[in-house]
Image (spheres, coloured by chain):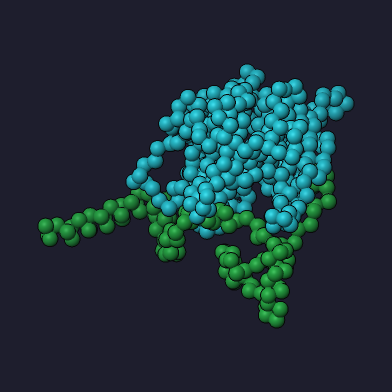
């Protein structure tokens, strides 16, 4: 299998050949906490690519235009700007440490009626801010119980609908997703739609709730679907059907027999993100050992690729990787026990119109392109 | 009736054994319970949430700290237990307990 991914919006075939394009960042073995990339986002045109890190810094890359004297640099992303966005603060009044880590970067559309942004730093509240009013916000969701001992779930992710500016979704640590319409009520504690996959009670275990926690939720570009990422899978939901997802893709099912160790080393709490390609025909998410996975929704083919310095010659094709879950390990397969759980790909981004992807591997940013690009 | 009871118990045990064989998740659960027998028995919120909420920073309250210092002039402040998983009401984080964090003024290596 050459590669999955139905393509961006150009008439791409289903068989893509992903190739190494660029890698940014240091080669040090010792990674400073501040250098860990915490978010990656393409702009709406794809010409700009932004990263944020745990040290509160933002780096913006710009795609080079075609240049006859430097033909190989066409399509390369080079540094456009960098700045310190956030600094660590200590709020003495509330005895709170305010972390400088960049959680999310969102590009503002150049011409848009949307002047609001959602902030969900807290586990318990979602606030709505008007871009021009910085001293107050509307609280639209508040799930803090009167007695914290009664707390049973927290908010894990939230997003505005891409076209209907009054609609937002938020996910929970119990694997549920609520869709709210801000037109129906000011305080959206009551949802318009409630998405939850029924659970088989006989298969319930101590880990069931933890692995069902949704770490990311993303609307499709079309606005018809949304995708959720939990610990072991990615699910696609049709907004018109609350009872169950329309698609479930297994990311690394072989980890189910390692849950005990993953709980002990805290990896079970890792928050993986997911993303759609430009025309919603493919989805991508990260895994361990610097592996990342792509699922083609039209052909149902999937592929596992690796972001590594060993495979970083210009335009080198990425070879599909395979994990051996048990039994005899074939040549070129990696066994589950030799996976490096410190090498996690939590953040990935797909160019909105082309087959170019950005993959954050701890402190390095990899850019891959389809050979045909 | 009494003859059936021992059979019912072994049927249950059999099902449990089957579960471990067919469900890797249940086998992992059994492993965890063997290592941490008291897991899941604390009241108020699930262990998962507890572990999740504990992953946050320790908070330093200058008011609490100074009042505690004033109260216990000659004694030492209660320090954190060797097992720092739970921050109890008695332990007041001191400036020494907090990890040192300096603002990062160095340019990101991604821009290098």
Compare residues A107 and A246 and report the one nearer the observer.
A107
Residue plotted at (61% across, 33% down): A159
Residue B10: percent from left, percent from top? 22, 58
Residue plotted at (71% across, 44% down): A102
Quadrant position of residue A23 = top right
In the displayed structure, A19 sits above or below B83; it is: above
Q: Is residue B82 visible?
A: yes
In the displayed structure, B69 sits above or below A293; it is: below
Residue A238: percent from left, percent from top? 49, 26
Compare residues A229 and B50 and report the one nearer the observer.
B50
Q: Residue furthest top?
A: A11
Q: The C terminus of chain A is located in which quarter?
A: top right
Q: The N terminus of chain A is located in which quarter?
A: top right
Residue A154: percent from left, percent from top? 54, 46
Q: Is residue A312 visible?
A: no
Residue A366: percent from left, percent from top? 70, 40
Q: Residue furthest right?
A: A69
Quadrant position of residue B88 = bottom right
Residue plotted at (71% across, 64% down): B63
Give the cyan chain's letter: A
- Residue B104 in the figure: left or right of residue A96: right
From the image, state the color of chain B.
green
Residue plotted at (45% across, 51% down): A207
Compare residues A255 and B77 and report the one nearer the observer.
B77
The tally of labels here is 0
- Residue A96 in the figure: left or right of residue A164: right
């Amino acid at each position: 299998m050459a590669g999955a991914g139905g393509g961006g919006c150009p008439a791409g075939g289903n068989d893509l050949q992903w190739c190494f394009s660029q890698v940014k960042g240091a080669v040090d073995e010792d990674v400073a906490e501040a250098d860990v990339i915490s978010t990656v986002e393409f702009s709406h045109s794809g010409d700009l690519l932004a990263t944020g890190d745990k040290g509160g810094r933002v780096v913006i890359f710009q795609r080079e235009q075609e240049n006859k004297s430097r033909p190989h640099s066409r399509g390369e992303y080079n540094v456009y700007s960098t700045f310190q966005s956030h600094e660590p603060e200590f709020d003495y009044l509330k005895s709170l440490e305010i972390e400088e880590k960049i959680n999310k970067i969102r590009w503002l559309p150049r011409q848009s009626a949307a002047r609001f942004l959602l902030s969900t730093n807290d586990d318990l509240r979602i606030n709505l801010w008007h871009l021009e009013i910085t001293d107050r916000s509307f609280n639209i969701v508040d799930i803090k119980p009167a007695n914290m001992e009664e707390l049973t779930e927290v908010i894990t992710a939230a997003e505005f609908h891409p076209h209907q500016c009054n609609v937002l979704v938020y996910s929970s640590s119990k694997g549920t997703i609520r869709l709210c319409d801000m037109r129906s009520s000011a305080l959206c504690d009551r949802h318009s739609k409630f998405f939850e996959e029924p659970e088989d009670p006989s298969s319930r275990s101590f880990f069931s709730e933890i692995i069902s926690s949704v770490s990311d939720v993303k609307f499709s570009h079309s606005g018809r679907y949304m995708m959720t990422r939990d610990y072991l899978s990615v699910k696609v939901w049709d907004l018109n059907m609350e009872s169950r997802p329309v698609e479930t893709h297994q990311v690394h099912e072989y980890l189910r027999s390692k849950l005990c160790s993953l709980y002990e080393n805290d990896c079970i709490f890792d928050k993986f993100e997911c993303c759609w390609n430009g025309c919603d025909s493919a989805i991508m998410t990260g895994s361990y050992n610097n592996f990342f996975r792509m699922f083609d929704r039209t052909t149902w083919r999937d592929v596992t690729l690796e972001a590594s310095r060993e495979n970083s010659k210009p335009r080198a094709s990425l070879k599909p990787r395979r994990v051996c879950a048990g039994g005899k390990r074939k040549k070129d397969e990696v066994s589950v026990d030799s996976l490096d759980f410190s090498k996690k790909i939590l953040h990935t981004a797909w160019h909105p119109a082309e087959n170019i992807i950005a993959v954050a591997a701890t402190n390095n940013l990899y850019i891959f392109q389809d050979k045909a690009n | 009736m009494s003859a059936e009871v021992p059979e019912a118990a072994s049927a249950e045990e059999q099902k449990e054994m089957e579960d471990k064989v067919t469900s890797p998740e249940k086998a992992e659960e059994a492993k965890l319970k063997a290592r941490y027998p008291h897991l899941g028995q604390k009241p108020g919120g699930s262990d998962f949430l507890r572990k999740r909420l504990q992953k946050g920073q320790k908070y330093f309250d200058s008011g609490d700290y100074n009042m505690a210092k004033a109260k216990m002039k000659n004694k030492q402040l209660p320090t954190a237990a060797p097992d720092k998983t739970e921050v109890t009401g008695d332990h007041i984080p001191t400036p020494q307990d907090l990890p040192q964090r300096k603002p990062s003024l160095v340019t990101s290596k991604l821009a290098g």
